[in-house]
Image: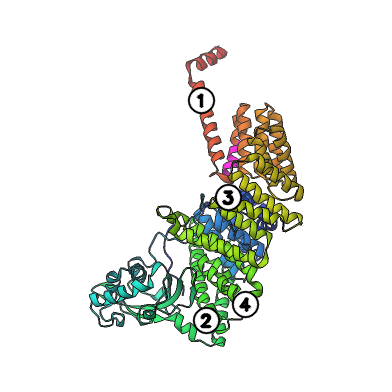
Amino acid sequence: MGQKNSNKGNFQPERTPQEDAQIQQVLTQYRQIAKSLSTSRNEEQVGAVLSPIFALSDATQLGVLKALAKENTTAAADISLAINTYAPQKEVRKEARRSLIRLEGKNTYPEWQIPTLLSLSDVLETNVFDEEDDVLDDENVVEHFLNHWGEGEFEAAYNLLSASSPLREGLSSDEWVARRQAWAAEAEPALVKVDIGYGLEADVEDLPDNLDNGAEELDAFWSLTMKDVPGSSSIPELPTATLVLPATGRHWFWAGYTFLVEDDELRILSIRDKGAEALQLSEEEIEDRLQEIAEEIQGMSEELDEDDEDDVEDDEDENELDDDRLDMYTEEVVWFTKQSLHYCDALIARIPENDGTYKLASQQAVVIHDMERAAAYVAIAVERFPEQRGEALRSLGAIYTHLAEDEYIEDEDIEDAEDTVSSRFMSLAEQALRDAIAIDNAVSDYVHLAELLMEQNKQDEAAALLEQAGTLTSEPQEQAIVEVGKAHLALVQDKPEVALAHYQRVAELAPDLSGVWYSIGDIQLSLQHRDAATKSFLKSIEVDPTTTDAYAELATIYIDQGNDTAASKILERGLVENPFAADLLAAQAMIYISRGDLRKAEESIKGAEESGSDMEIVQVVRQVIDMQKEQLRQQQRSPGSRSKKSKKRR
């Protein structure tokens, strides 16, 4: 059962004892990290919270995620979701998704919401299951068929159908294509997305490579945007949608496909509308199916945990096999989850008043990173549960903003910026937040909307919203949120002095707010107020000793003042709190270089490389050390050096 596993190479670096210790350190702090995530308002703040993890080596980050998957807590799920969204390394994002799926097997889901505002100028790829290989190698006829069909290439789609397929309706290619072109002119199908998996009836291990002429069934979970027009029901290859998001027109389908081999080529014989079958089930039958899937996922998760406990020391080949096993497990859970979502759709159709189904479905959609589908469930809840409408709109705004972020890079080459997928999602996010304000008048919604408008260069309206938000509350924490928004606006307007004043006000209102003192020091330093910046950075590490950037900035200030001793001491202090911080170890190495102590510099940079070799500062310091060593070797080989040595020997 499940999807066919590809035999691609796997990324499984070995860990050192030091890296194992780093993993344990993160585990002792992960609940606090999750708590800090919950108060993060934008991508910059999330990045600061996750920086101690991202500073670790790839192998250590993977180890952290594997360990979090065993914690079975919402905090662990929240961190996994954040890493899945923001990690620079694709393999780390992939492992984060595995952790989310393993936690799903234990009915543990994240509660953290991706911040409403994400920087559109620095987008991270988040679809970590983009495969380089075709799902079925040369047998991916279903995927090709659906992509051709969804893009209006109907002749190519027709040619992928068996000559005996009832889907051809006895029509010639020209007749078949003309009928679909007429339909498409009204329905406007576009943006097809396809995921392939084997049906429950098929035994993956027994399937022949070319499927021969057996009627084995292949499942496709697919979706596209389209308008609902009267002629849709007469198109036999178009299944029944189990879910629709009216705001975008995306429809979700579930169908099973059978095949024949004609002239040594695989062709589609028939389609079974599994979505329609799910919608016809009784309430009891649907709940039974959902329970069966939940038990299947839980059993797979428990089996995987038992296998992990049995693993003591794996060699490299065993590690690769273990990673293959994890890939297969992850793909099967994704497949089961997609099936579960269609059954949730059917249950919603049967019992629309059960709000728990919407929550379960939206959580599952987030886990498999189908954010538009998550938006569909939340959008339905907005309409059906008036008492929850404000909170639901707030969530919808966050999801739409994230979708705008995901689509941004794909839209970069489109000339008409007003008509991109990304801009449409941004407009939907803006409307959701405006609707939330109309209902709850919540301070946080004003600030989130203002941040969104800043990204669209609507600074005047953003300023007005922030001013209005400030009049709505006297509660210090909410006032602090408003001041942070005003500080961000001032920075966008290139007014650092104004931003500084707002951050200082934040410090008065919420002195323990993570990152505020560092932000103050950073601006003070840019304004050449070094003494004030020094005090702010010291306050930053007092409030949050894990803010490694503050130690590094202090060390730089002390070095510029010619006080290497103070720089060394502050770095040592930082390394006591953050013993594996690559940036601090690299800074320490630079101090040793300035003292001519290349041996200690080498020790520090090696520690930095083991903790975070991808960091730019680590690579730069490594280059400096290597250059210094080469210069020293050249000096030792020079004639003058040999002459001096020979004189000493005489």
Of callouts 4 and 3, which one flags the residue occurring earlier in the amino acid sequence? Answer: 4
- The disc labelled 4 sits on which kind of residue? Asp
Circle 1 residue: 631
Please tell me how crowded label 2 is: few (under 14), some (14-19), or many (20+) other residues with Cα within 10 Å: many
Q: What is the crowding at mark 1: few (fewer than 14 residues within 10 Å), some, or many (at least 20)?
A: few
Query: Which of labels 2 and 3 is toward the front?
Result: 3
On residue 459, the disc is 3
Image quarter of the C terminus? top right
Q: Which one is earlier in the sequence, the residue at label 2 or at label 1?
A: 2
Residue 315 percent across, percent down from the top left: 52, 56
The tag earlier along the polypeptide, 2 or 3, is 2
Disc 2/disc 4 C-alpha distance (Å)? 14 Å
Q: Which residue is painted at 58% across and 35% down in the image? A: 602
For the residues labelled 2 and 3, say whether their Cβ atoms are less than 8 Å apart: no
Measured Cα–Cα span from mark 3 to mark 1: 53 Å
Which is more foreground, mark 2 or mark 1?
A: 2
- Given residues 95 and 165, the one toward you in this image is 165
In this figure, which residue is indicated by the disc labeled 2? 346
Task: Tell me the CA gap for discs 2 and 1.
Answer: 72 Å
> Which element carries disc 4, helix, strand or loop?
helix
Where does the magenta region start and end? 603-610
Q: Nearer the viewer, residue 363 or 612?
A: 363
Residue 58 in the image: state x and y as whole percent. 55, 51
To which quarter of the image does residue 164 belong? bottom left
How far is disc 4 from disc 3 in space, using C-alphas? Answer: 38 Å
For marks 1 and 4, the one nearer the N-term is: 4
Which numbered disc covers residue 173?
A: none
Q: Which numbered disc, 3 or 1, marks the residue that appears first in the sequence? A: 3
- Seen in the picture, residue 301 relative to 93 is either above or below; the reply is below
Q: Is 394 contained in the magenta span?
A: no
Q: Kindly check if marks 4 and 3 are in contact, taking CB atoms under 8 A apart as contact.
A: no
Tag on residue 355?
4
